Each structure stands twice: as C-alpha cells, then as structure tokens.
Image (tube, coloured by chain):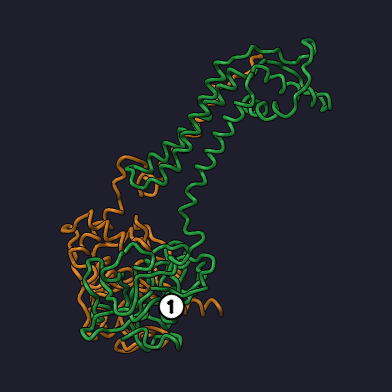
Chain colours: A green, B orange
Amino acid sequence: MKRWLIALLVLLLGRRRRRPVLDEDARLVPAGSPDRRAENVVLLLFGAATLCAIAFPVIYAWDAIPNQTQFLGLAVGLALAFVSAACIVIGKRLVVTEELEDEYGDAHPDDQEALEQLVDESGSRFTRKKLLLLAGAGAGTALGAAVITPAASLGPVFDVSSLYRTPWRRGIRLVDELGNAFRADDIEEGTFYTAYPEHADREQMGAPLVVVRLEPAELQLPESRNGWAPEGILAFSKICTHAGCAIALYRKPTFPAVQPSPALVCPCHYSTFNVATGGEVVFGPAGRPLPQLPLELSGAGELRAAGNFSGPVGPSWWGVRRHGARP
Amino acid sequence: MRYALLLLAALAFVPVAAGSGTDLYGANCIECHGPQGRGIPERGPSLRGVGARAADFYLRTGYMPLGNPHDQPHRKRVQFTKRELAELVAYVASFGGGPPIPRPEPARGNLAEGQELFTEHCAGCHQIDAEGGYVTNAVAPPLDRASPVEIAEAVRTGPYLMPRFSEKQIGDDQLNSIIRYVQYAKHPDDRGGWSLGHVGPVPEGLVTWFVAVVLLIATCAVIGQRIRS
C-alpha cells in the first residue's frame, strides 16, 4: 500500500518539481537502472484500462445487446483490474525500493526534505514520465466517465414535457390485467383493484390505476371534483408521488369509528394517502397528493375516464407544479 | 383502592365461562357490540350479517374480546373451550345472514402459484416470507401461527385494517394455493444457501462481500512485502 502511494506521488510530484540532480554521495536512494520493458507493460495496461472504461458507456447506450448487465460489469471490472495491475507493475518493477529500519525520531524540517528527496529519487528509473502520466490520467478519466454514464438514465434534463403526459383521456375504459373492462358492479367496498387504460402501453408511468369504492356519504372530495366518483368509486394513480413505487397497500378499517381512516399506503416509505379526501397526504415523505382520475359510467355500467389526472403522475421533479397532467 | 379498581377492570375482560352462546355473549361481547349484535357507536361495530366466518376468526385467534376498542387486536391465548367457542360463533351467526366458516383445502393448491399470488396480494404488508410488517398506524401480523382456516377467513373477511378479497379477486382454488404457500413459508426449504431472511441469495451475497474483503486483504499481503528484522 505504502509503495503504491509512493508510486502515485512519484507520478504526480516527479513532474512538477525537478530537483537538481545531486551528486551520487548525496543520494538517499540508490539510482536504479531504467526499465523500458516494464514501462511498456504499464503503458499497455493503462491503455487496456482506458479501452475497457470507454466500452462501458458504449455498451450502456447499446440497448439491443444481450446480457447487457453482465457486459457492463465486465467492462468496469476489467478496467479496474488493468489499473490495479499497472499499479502493481509500477510498484514492483519501476519504483526503486530499499529496505530500511529506523527509529522514529522527532519531527524535523530536514526529515521532510529528506522524504521529498526520497520520493523524487525513487522515480529515477522512469524514463518517460509524461507519457506514463498521460496514460494513467487517460485511464482515470475514462473510468470516471464510465461511472457517471448511468446518470444519463435518471430522466430528461431539458425537455420535461414527456413527464406530464399520461394515456388517459375522456372515454377510455378501465380494464384489468387480462384486458376485461371493469364494471361498476365489479368494484366492491373494502378492497382495491388495479386497472389499466384500454389499448394503451401499460409500462407508461401514468397508465396503472388503483380503484377503490367508498360509501358516497364518506366522501369529502373538494368542490372542484364534484362527480369525479360515481357511486363512490375512486381511481388514483398507482405510482407514489414520492419515489415512484407502486401503491400496493390499502388500509381499510373494519370499524371506522375507532380505527384510522381508509388510506392507500406505499410499501416503500409508508407515504399514506387519504382516499376520502381525494388522495391527500396524511403521513410519510410524499410531497404531493396522489393524482386522482375522474371517472364516469357508460350506459352499460362500465367504468371510463372522464378526463385526465388531477395533477402530474409519478415522483416529483423540478417544476412539477407548473402544469397539470396532459393527454 | 386503586388496586381494587384495577382488579375490577381486569375482571371485566376475563371471559365468563357459562353454558350457552347467549350467556357467553352477554358476559364477553355485549358491552361493545350491544344486545343482539346491533353495535354501539364509538365502541363496537354491528355484528348482524357478519356470519360465522368473521366470528370464528376473531374468536379463535384471540383477537376478541378486546379490552380497549381503540387498540389493534393481537393474537392472544383463547380463553374459551372449543365447545364454548362453537356456541358463541353459532350465536353470532344466528343474528342473520352471513357466510359460514370456510373449508380450505391447501393440499389441492399449487405452491408456485401460491407464491406468485402471495407476492401480488399479501406481501406488500405481510412481507414475502410472511413474517409480518407494518402499515401506517398498524401492524400487519406475522403468519407463522395462522392455520389454513384462519387464513381463509382473514382473506375473505379482511379483519381490522386489512382489505378483504372476494371470490372474484382470489378464487377458492387460488386461495388454496396461497394457504399452501403460507404453510410452506413457516418452514421454507433453504436449499442452496443459508436461511438469511429466507429471500434467496441476496443476503448471502452481502455476506460474501465480507469474504471478498478478506480475499482482497490476502491479495495485498501476497503482493506486498514485510520488512524482515
């Protein structure tokens, strides 16, 4: 470990401060003979590390490749392995080494100077310092870039309009996993259902719904949402507004008089949304209410959307409150 | 004086062993659920129409009688004999309507399907290994002592804050599979690894990291040198 650190120091310091070469008697470390073969090996290893690290963003961007994850791991793993191999070669073959045993003395400015001289002279076997430095820096930069690459998947940075879009608009029927349309009679009290828009991509953030039924007398929806819950049937986005987990818990009291009010709960961080008041946050880290979807009944008693959500779906981002959900 | 009051309070919740279901109801349930199971506002819900299914679940798990109606009921030792329990259940069922005690047949279920269904419907609260968890303001109990009949009753009744699941959502065959999985989860087959959390190789992988760290240190020792004195 110590030698590796010294090797790094040599690479960094060896360049900046060029001490006047002292005569042989003043040397602390015996001068080593240059070893161009070892240097070539180091250059080769740094080059291989750079190539592997560059391969990472390439594989990351290339979605069609099979076993992508394994190849990503291989790229980073090999890059790190090559860098460490290069360090080992530097430490073993290039840095002048000498075994000394010494008592710890008091700290003294001379010791500091001697240490600097030691570091300086340990690099005496390097013949192409700049090239080696460049190779090392190249490998480091490529690895750094590889590590940052996945951040590109965190979401759109400049054009966030796609985040407001949902597949719901007036008249779209609610269907179950098998594609069967939900009828109002299917929705019972005391339990919850997952619904999707008919003929739409279910993988979209705005697609899945959680549907519950309350007694119409229990509803305390805001004025602006009059008629959003026919027969007391309410539909909400199934995606939590905190971190985007699926709302999988429904807390339905058997005896509401002495038990907590009916609420949808996210299993990830226990954000709790009161269904009776239209998805208000009553507990947990969520910063926005759960978006509610207005419903209407078709002539045949089937459930249909009567518009779009009450707000943007999914976890928050900058400017999330600027617009509502859009078709 | 205070001790006397405490004793009195404790006595109020000790079930009184008596003959028929009517007497048992009068001694243990009427205070909150009212005469003829009509319910008392702010104390206890009406029991009319709940049937033998709900009564059997709440009584055989020891959920009822409950000291304070504001507490979440927990599994307790049942203080009725089997006969008393049956009589009490029959009396509550006699209030009218209500479903009978289900008769699940977990042997006819499919374990793999059961795990899938449990993951989808139950694991959100009870955790995938059925060891229980939390919802806001309540505890989702562990299922390590739940019998097949109790599981079937709970799924259909939805006790306390649990949602209930109708035959449309979870068919009787599917319920058999779920019960079979819950029975399996009590003593899971931990083949191919240690039983850390019973959730497969992930925790083992974590432990492997500690092994990997030792290996890394060993590598350092091999490629490094020690000063010989």
Tell me: B35 left or right of A116.
Answer: left
Q: Residue A91 versus residue B23: which sits nearer the camera? A: A91
Q: Is residue A312 left or right of residue B64?
A: right
In the depicted structure, whether residue B127 falls above or below residue A5: below
Q: Residue B147: percent from the left, percent from the top?
A: 27, 62
Q: State the residue in front, B86 or A184.
A: A184
Q: Residue A299: name its quadrant.
A: bottom left
**Residue at the farthest top position:** A25
Provide the chain ID for the residue under circle 1.
A
* Helix, strand or loop status at disc 1: loop
Coordinates of residue A20 in the picture (x, y in percent) = 79, 19
Q: Is residue B13 visible?
A: no
Q: Position of residue A71 (x, y in %)?
A: 38, 39
Q: Which residue shows up at 47% across the image and 55% down it?
A: A154
Q: Callout 1: few (<14), some (14-19), or many (20+) C-alpha neighbours within 10 Å?
A: some
Q: Would you place residue A10 above or below residue B113 in this image?
A: above
Give coordinates of residue A311: x percent, y percent: 45, 75
Q: Is residue A63 above or below residue A47?
A: below
